[in-house]
Image (cartoon, rainbow, N blue to C red):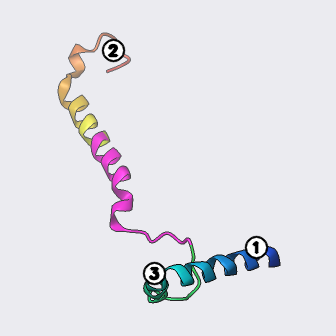
Amino acid sequence: MALSSRDQSVLDAIARQIAADDPALVRDLSEHGDGVVTAERIHSTWDAWPVALIAICLAVFTVVLLLAGSPHSLPHTAIR
């Protein structure tokens, strides 16, 4: 999104004021690059942990259900 000429002039005035007040800050910030800034998210290996945790919980729950009861203890024959 492009800035209006008024907004750009205000930002330029702020930049000039900061440069006048704290030249060391301007020097330090200028060392960090001058490319286009994007808001892309960098995916990491930890992004899938909630899905893995849910899968592990479901697997444990399934095993517990299978080991907890026997088919003979169910009240109705249609459920067995």
Q: Amino acid at mark 1?
A: Asp
Horizontal and vertical percent for residue 4? 81, 75
Distance Cα–Cα, label 2 vs label 3? 78 Å
What element does badge 1 sit on?
A: helix
Residue 4 visible in the shown view: no
Looking at this view, name the residue that lies furthest to the front: 21
Residue 63 image point, x, y percent: 22, 36
Left-right relation of 76 to 60? right
Residue 76 belongs to the span the image colors magenta: no
Residue 39: image quadrant is bottom right
* Disc 1: which residue: 7
- Mark 2: which amino acid? Thr
Residue 12 screen position, x and y as percent:
68, 81
Magenta stretch?
39-57
In the rendered image, residue 47 lying in the magenta stretch gets the answer yes
Q: Please determine whether, in this image, residue 52 is positioned above or below residue 72.
A: below
Q: CA distance from mark 2 to mark 1?
A: 77 Å
The percent coordinates of residue 36 (x first, y second) are 59, 84
> Could one spot residue 15 in this view of the protein?
yes
Residue 32, relative to residue 52: is it above or below? below
Q: Residue at x 31, y 48 (%)?
A: 53
Q: Earlier in the sequence, mark 3 or mark 1?
A: 1
Nearest to the observer: residue 70 or residue 24: 24
Which sits earlier in the primary sequence, circle 2 or circle 1?
1
Q: Say few, some or many: other residues with alpha carbon within 10 Å of mark 1 (under 14 / 14 to 19 / 20 or more).
A: few
Q: Nearer the viewer, mark 2 or mark 1?
A: 1
Location of mark 3 (residue): 25
* Residue under label 2: 77
SS type, badge 2:
loop
Residue type, mark 3 in image:
Leu
In space, the residues marked 3 and 1 are separated at their CA atoms by: 23 Å
